[in-house]
Image (cartoon, rainbow, N blue to C red):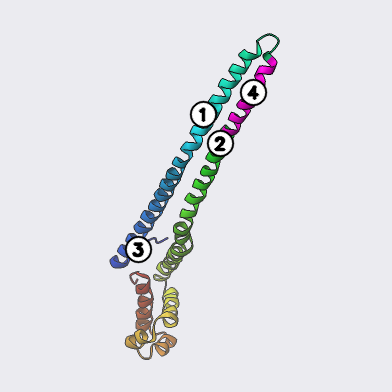
C-alpha cells in the first residue's frame, strides 16, 4: 500500500494537505468544545436557582416540622410553610429545567458546529485520498510487470490529454497496437507520473 507519492513535490503536497486536514479537524473539535463550555456557563443562574429553591424548601420544611409540634394548633400553622416549601421546590425544578435546556442546547450547537468540518473531511477529502492510495498501490504493482506496463500504457491513452499524447508520439495508438516497447514504456511512465510515481 502506498500512502505518499514517489515524486517529492507530490509527496510534500500530500503531506502538507494531510497535516492541514488534521489541524482542521483538531481546530473544529476545539471550537466545538469551547462553544459547549461557553454555553454551559449560561446554566450557572439555573444552578443558583436550584440551590436557592432547595435550600429554601429544606429550611421551610424544618421550620414547619418545629411549628407542627406546637400542641393543638401545630397542624394549622404548618400549612403555610408546606405551601411555601412546595413553591420553593417549583423554583428549584425551574432551575433544573433551565440547566437541562442549556445542556441540550450546548450539546446540539457543539455537534452542529462539527457537522460541516467533519463532513468535508469524510465526504470530500477522505474519498479522494483513499482513491489515490488504491490507484497508486495498483499502479506501483503493475509497473514491474510487462503486461502491467501495457495496461498502464492503455490507461494513459484513455486518460491523458490529447496534447500530451501528441507531443509524446503523434502515432502513439498505432505504436501501442504494434507492441512497441519504447512507446509502451513512455506511456506507462506518463500514467505513473500523473499519479506521482516513478517508472519501473
Labels 1, 4: front one: 4
Q: Residue at x 62, y 22 (%)?
A: 81
Location of residue 88 in the rendering, given as x and y in whole percent from the top left corner: 58, 29
User: Which of 32/190 is in front?
Assistant: 32
Marking on residue 119: none
The residue indicated by pointer 1 is: 52
The residue indicated by pointer 2 is: 96
- For label 4, the SS is helix
Q: Marks 1 and 3, how far apart in space?
A: 58 Å
The correct choice, above or below, for 114 with respect to 192 in the image is above
Location of residue 157 in the rendering, given as x and y in whole percent from the top left corner: 42, 83
The N terminus, quarter of image: bottom left
Asked whether residue 187 is drawn in magenta, I would say: no
Q: Which comes before the other along the chain, label 4 or label 3?
A: 3
Q: Marks 1 and 4, how far apart in space?
A: 19 Å
State which quadrant residue 101 falls in: top right
- For label 3, the SS is helix
Q: Which comes before the other along the chain, label 1 or label 3?
A: 3
Q: Residue furthest top?
A: 71
Q: Which comes before the other along the chain, label 3 or label 2?
A: 3
The residue indicated by pointer 3 is: 14
Location of residue 175 in the rendering, given as x and y in whole percent from the top left corner: 39, 88
- In the image, the segment drawn in magenta is 75-91
Labels 3, 2: front one: 2
Q: Residues within 10 Å of mark 1 (few under 14, many from 20)?
A: some
Say if mark 3 contacts mark 2, CB within 8 Å: no
The residue indicated by pointer 4 is: 80
Labels 4, 3: front one: 4
Q: Residue at x 39, y 83 (%)?
A: 161
Amino acid at each position: 500500500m502506498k500512502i505518499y507519492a514517489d515524486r517529492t513535490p507530490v509527496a510534500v503536497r500530500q503531506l502538507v494537505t494531510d497535516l492541514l486536514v488534521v489541524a482542521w479537524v483538531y481546530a473544529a473539535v476545539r471550537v466545538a468544545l469551547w462553544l459547549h463550555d461557553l454555553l454551559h456557563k449560561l446554566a450557572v443562574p439555573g444552578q443558583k436557582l436550584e440551590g436557592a429553591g432547595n435550600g429554601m424548601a429544606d429550611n421551610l420544611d424544618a421550620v414547619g416540622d418545629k411549628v407542627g409540634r406546637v400542641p393543638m394548633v401545630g397542624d394549622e400553622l404548618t400549612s403555610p410553610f408546606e405551601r411555601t416549601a412546595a413553591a420553593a421546590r417549583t423554583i428549584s425544578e425551574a432551575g433544573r429545567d433551565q440547566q437541562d435546556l442549556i445542556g441540550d442546547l450546548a450539546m446540539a450547537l457543539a455537534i452542529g458546529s462539527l457537522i460541516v468540518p467533519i463532513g468535508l473531511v469524510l465526504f470530500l477529502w477522505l474519498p479522494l485520498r483513499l482513491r489515490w492510495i488504491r490507484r497508486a498501490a495498483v499502479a506501483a504493482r503493475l509497473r514491474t510487470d510487462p503486461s502491467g506496463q501495457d495496461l498502464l500504457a492503455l490507461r494513459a491513452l484513455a486518460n491523458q490529454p490529447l496534447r500530451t499524447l501528441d507531443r509524446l508520439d503523434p502515432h502513439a495508438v498505432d505504436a501501442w497496437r504494434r507492441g512497441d516497447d519504447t512507446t509502451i514504456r513512455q506511456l506507462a511512465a506518463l500514467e505513473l507520473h500523473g499519479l506521482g510515481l516513478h517508472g519501473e
